[in-house]
Image: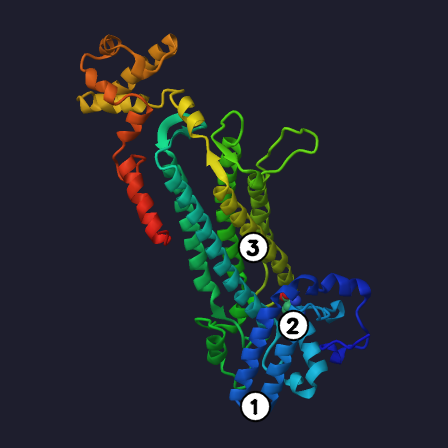
């Protein structure tokens, strides 16, 4: 068995079970790009501080480049007996270039190394998520433009409430996604500080330049306290929390679209490209991707819970428990990226069944509030007009008709102030057109917002 890089004081090797139990290379190999990036910045800094020679630096940089290429080509052997990504790369570098590589770990610990890798990884992951959020927003805005005039029932308690424009509903998702993106951007600001040079926990007596490495790695600044730098995973928690909120938003969209695709609603039809079938029922066409968007939100929320629980009660500085932060972090990001991608494709591959929606629209008297508003305009106090509109609905229910189908005399019997112009308020289309308040579903409002979103998202 190969001697461990930390093996100086040990007389015996670890048992197989301990080796299997403590390794992290099976998943932290995914950090290799950032580990190499950090090592290169560190080696360059060591050379400019006179801690290693320029010659040694060049040998180290060249060796690291070769290793990176081998990894990318799938020709690098990840070894469990070398524990983690840091020691796999360092040991391989020593094997390749010899003595100079043994100087790389000067004024560095795996404790600052891992958290530097992780912050770099999170930064890139956030940037990828931001791109995917925007793509989904674009697909929703396109859909909203395509169906600009389509009125759909708006629901509260899943009961018919008031008619709304479909684009208004779709833009409500776009707004949520914008806040999700905002949370990512805020989180990225706090992620982007450099722990490198904090070493094990106390810093170092060697004359390193932490500002140089921070700048080289495009961090805002080095972290100010070496103990804090190696301790905290609050940036992971914040990222997982932002992911969780986004996932909960996406799960709501998933739920609505699954519902809307049902025979009962029949609002939308997903194309074959985004549907799957049944192994027993030949007629089936299921919206599985959106069900899984709903489903995968569970793991994203679970990943946050895992790391919260992991961090609770940990003493300051590095504790090995922290190795357990990576799998939930990787899992959460993989899930959210997949969810966003599939949501985008779903939005690009559904059609709304305008005829069917229109024919079912009047059901549930969604214009009743507009009748109440009409009476308010005639000077009737809202509580009274609510009562009158309610009685009118009750009459419709007994006659099995719509509000717009009631005779003027029937309506006048409820309130003498009702005149023929009431028919300009009744019916779903009239009702939608009456909305004028800022942010409402009135078509002028929605048109303006849709235009603003098209500009903001760069859609020509
Ligand atoms: N594999 C470890 C982790 O993921 C790296 C840091 C280990 N440091 C140590 N002193 N054992 O957290």
Q: Is residue 229 above or below residue 245?
A: below
Q: Is residue 106 visible?
A: no
| Foreground residue among 86 and 67 | 67
Answer with mark 1 or mark 2, whichever residue precedes in sequence: 1
- Residue sitting at x 57%, y 53%: 332
- Residue 145 lies, with reference to residue 261, above or below; the image says below
The image quadrant of residue 71 is: bottom right
Q: Is mark 2 within 8 Å of ligand 1?
A: yes
Q: Are the residues at dot 1 and dot 2 in contact (C-beta closer than 8 Å)?
A: no
Is label 1 within 8 A of ligand 1 (CB to nearest ligand atom)? no
Q: Residues within 10 Å of mark 3 (few under 14, many from 20)?
A: many
Front-most of 390 and 374?
374
The image's mark for residue 16 is none
Dividing the image into 4 quarters, which one contains the N terminus?
bottom right
Please name the residue shown 23% across and 11% down the image: 408
Give the mark nearer the N terminus: 3 vs 2.
2
What residue is pinned by disc 3?
333
Residue 304: x and y, percent?
56, 51
Mark 1 Cα within 10 Å, few/some/many (few <14, many 20+)?
some
Contact between labelled residues 1 and 3, with CB atoms less than 8 Å apart: no
Which residue appears at 50% of the width and 44% of the height?
A: 250
Q: Quadrant of residue 373?
A: top left
Residue in front for this viewpoint, 151 or 390: 151
| Residue bearing the label numbered 1 | 54
Q: Give how far apart the Cα atoms at labels 3 and 1 are.
A: 39 Å
* Circle 2 Cα neighbour tier, 10 Å, few/some/many (<14 / 14–19 / ≥20): many
How far is the residue under mark 3 from the one under mark 2? 22 Å
Residue on which the image places disc 2: 86
**Mark 3 or 1, nearer chain start:** 1
How far apart marks 1 and 2 lie (CA) works out to 23 Å
The verdict on label 3 being within 8 Å of ligand 1 is: no
């Amino acid at each position: 068995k190969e001697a461990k890089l930390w093996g100086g004081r040990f007389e015996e090797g670890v048992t197989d079970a301990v080796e299997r139990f403590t390794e992290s290379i099976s998943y932290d190999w995914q950090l290799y790009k950032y580990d190499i990036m950090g090592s290169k910045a560190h080696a360059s800094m060591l050379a400019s501080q006179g801690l290693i020679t320029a010659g040694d630096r060049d040998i180290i940089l060249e060796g690291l480049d070769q290793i990176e290429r081998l990894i990318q080509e799938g020709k690098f052997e990840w070894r469990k007996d070398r524990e983690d990504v840091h020691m796999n790369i360092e040991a391989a570098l020593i094997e390749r270039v010899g003595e100079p590589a043994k100087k790389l770990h000067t004024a560095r610990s795996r404790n600052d190394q891992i958290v530097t890798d992780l912050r770099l990884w999170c930064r890139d992951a956030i940037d990828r998520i931001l791109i995917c959020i925007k793509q989904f927003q674009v697909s929703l805005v396109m859909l909203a433009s395509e169906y600009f005039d389509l009125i759909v029932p708006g629901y509260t308690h899943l009961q018919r409430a008031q008619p709304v424009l479909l684009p208004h509903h779709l833009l409500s998702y776009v707004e949520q996604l914008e806040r999700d993106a905002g949370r990512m951007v805020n989180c990225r600001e706090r992620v982007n500080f450099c722990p490198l040079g904090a070493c094990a926990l106390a810093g170092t007596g060697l004359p390193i330049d932490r500002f140089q490495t921070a700048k080289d790695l495009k961090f805002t600044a080095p972290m100010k306290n070496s103990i804090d730098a190696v301790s905290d995973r609050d940036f992971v928690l914040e990222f997982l929390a932002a992911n969780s909120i986004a996932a909960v938003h996406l799960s709501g969209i998933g739920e609505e679209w699954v519902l809307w695709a049902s025979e009962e609603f029949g609002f939308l039809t997903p194309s074959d490209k985004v549907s799957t079938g049944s192994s027993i029922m030949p007629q089936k066409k299921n919206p599985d991707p959106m069900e899984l968007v709903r489903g995968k939100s569970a793991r994203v929320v679970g990943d946050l819970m895992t790391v919260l629980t992991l961090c609770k009660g940990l003493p300051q500085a590095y504790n090995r428990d922290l190795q357990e932060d990576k799998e939930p972090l990787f899992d959460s990001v993989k899930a959210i990226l997949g969810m966003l991608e599939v949501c985008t494709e779903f939005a690009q591959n559904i059609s709304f069944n305008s005829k069917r929606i229109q024919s079912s629209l009047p059901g549930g008297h969604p214009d009743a509030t507009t009748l109440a508003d009409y009476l308010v305009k005639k000077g009737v106090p809202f509580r009274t007009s609510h009562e009158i509109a309610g009685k009118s609905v009750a009459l419709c229910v007994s006659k099995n008709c719509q509000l717009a189908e009631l005779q003027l005399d029937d309506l006048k019997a409820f309130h003498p102030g009702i005149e023929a112009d009431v028919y300009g308020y009744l019916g779903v289309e009239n009702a939608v057109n009456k909305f004028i308040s800022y942010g409402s579903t009135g078509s002028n409002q929605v048109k303006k917002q849709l235009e603003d979103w098209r500009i903001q998202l760069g859609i020509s």
